[in-house]
């Protein structure tokens, strides 16, 4: 029974991690159709923002939940104003530009923080369940992911801001005709996506050793999760993260962590072969 409880917690944690990693990209790619290859580097900067703030005496939860999203969101705002806004509708050019930005951010982080591994301790201790040890910080990540999904749904579905943003992404000419500026809406949306990426990197920072190239560990999983989810933002994110998280942890526990990662990739290939438009193109139609 204890073993089942441990596996259940780890499966939910894996799903929550995928949601957290992919949320920012889901906003930028799912809504704006911008292929942001620097998504991992935005997460990396969120981690460094958290570590730097903690080193200056800021409470770790304030650093993770407030400082990092604001810092990375502002960086994303600058990137959108200087680069991305000139490339909307040009997918290949956007890919090349964001790939160049990822290299730039890695270089800048290396110059500022060095190429050595750094990190911070988890603020929540672990505990035992029978003969097994569970990381208490996993529950914090699960909680953050739930709050994040509920908040995204509430904003996009229940507020005028969310309605205008979704409308502008689908038909910017109509939004402009109604008196809204698509340019400002795109700017605000990219800011939000960048801030969520920074939040993800910040929350995951206590679990990993951070180096300037850490973003590369997240970008593939984020894109797989978002693309496999399909056109519905929230439902797609939850369904693909749930499936991949379950597959990953089942193979991790039964075989090895390496096979867990391989199984996740194979599951993604099979899913996209069977459902090339994503899960929500076939199921959960009409859902947010």
Image: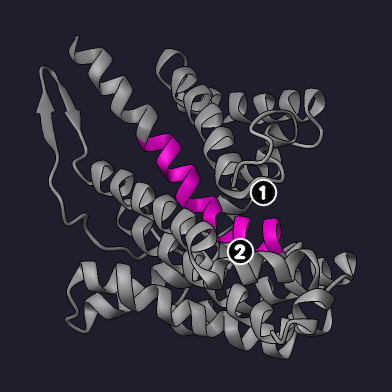
* Color style of the picture: one colour
Label 2: which secondary element: helix
Range of the magenta residues?
A: 13-31
Label 1: which secondary element: helix
Residue 39: mark in rendering: 2
225 part of magenta stretch: no
Q: Quadrant of the N terminus?
A: top left
Callout 1: few (<14), some (14-19), or many (20+) C-alpha neighbours within 10 Å? many
At 55% across and 30% down in the image, what residue appears? 244
Mark 2 or mark 1: whose residue is earlier in sequence: 2
Q: Quadrant of residue 46?
A: bottom left
Q: Residue furthest top?
A: 1
Residue that badge 1 annotates: 223
Q: Is residue 92 left or right of residue 115?
A: right
Task: Give the image location of residue 43, x and y in percent.
Answer: 50, 64
The residues bearing labels 2 and 1 have C-alpha atoms spaced at a distance of: 9 Å
At 54% across and 83% down in the image, what residue appears? 75
Task: Give the image location of residue 202, x and y in percent.
Answer: 37, 64
17 part of magenta stretch: yes
Above or below — where is 208 with respect to 210? above
2 and 1 marks in contact (CB < 8 Å)? yes
At 43% across and 13% down in the image, what residue appears? 254
Task: Give the image location of residue 63, x and y in percent.
Answer: 28, 73
Magenta stretch mostly in which secondary structure? helix
Task: Give the image location of residue 36, x and y in percent.
Answer: 70, 65
Above or below — where is 239 with respect to 208? above
Callout 2: few (<14), some (14-19), or many (20+) C-alpha neighbours within 10 Å? many
- Residue 64 or residue 186, whichever sits in front: 186
């Amino acid at each position: 029974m204890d073993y089942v409880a441990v596996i259940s917690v780890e499966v939910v944690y894996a799903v929550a991690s995928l949601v957290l990693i992919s949320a920012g990209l889901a906003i930028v790619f799912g809504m704006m159709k911008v292929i942001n290859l620097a998504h991992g580097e935005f997460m990396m900067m969120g981690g460094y923002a958290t570590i730097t703030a903690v080193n200056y005496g800021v409470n770790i939860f304030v650093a993770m939940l407030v400082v990092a999203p604001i810092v990375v969101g502002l960086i994303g705002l600058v990137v959108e104003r200087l680069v991305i806004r000139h490339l909307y509708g040009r997918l290949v050019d956007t890919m090349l530009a964001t790939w160049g930005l990822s290299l730039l951010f890695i270089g800048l982080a290396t110059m500022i923080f060095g190429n050595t591994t750094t990190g911070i301790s988890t603020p929540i201790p672990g505990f035992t369940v029978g003969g097994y040890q569970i990381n208490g910080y996993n529950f914090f990540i699960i909680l953050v992911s739930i709050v994040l999904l509920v908040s995204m749904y509430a904003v996009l579905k229940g507020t005028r801001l969310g309605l205008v943003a979704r409308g502008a992404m689908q038909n910017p000419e109509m939004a402009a005709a109604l008196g809204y500026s698509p340019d400002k809406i795109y700017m605000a949306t990219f800011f939000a996506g960048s801030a969520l990426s920074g939040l993800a990197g910040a929350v995951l920072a206590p679990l990993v050793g951070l180096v300037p190239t850490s973003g590369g560990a997240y970008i593939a999983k984020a894109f797989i999760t978002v693309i496999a989810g399909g056109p519905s933002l929230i439902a797609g994110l939850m369904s693909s993260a749930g499936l991949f998280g379950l597959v990953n942890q089942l193979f991790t526990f039964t075989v090895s962590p390496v096979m867990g990662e391989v199984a996740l990739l194979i599951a993604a290939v099979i899913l996209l072969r069977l459902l090339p438009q994503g899960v929500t193109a076939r199921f959960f139609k009409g859902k947010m």
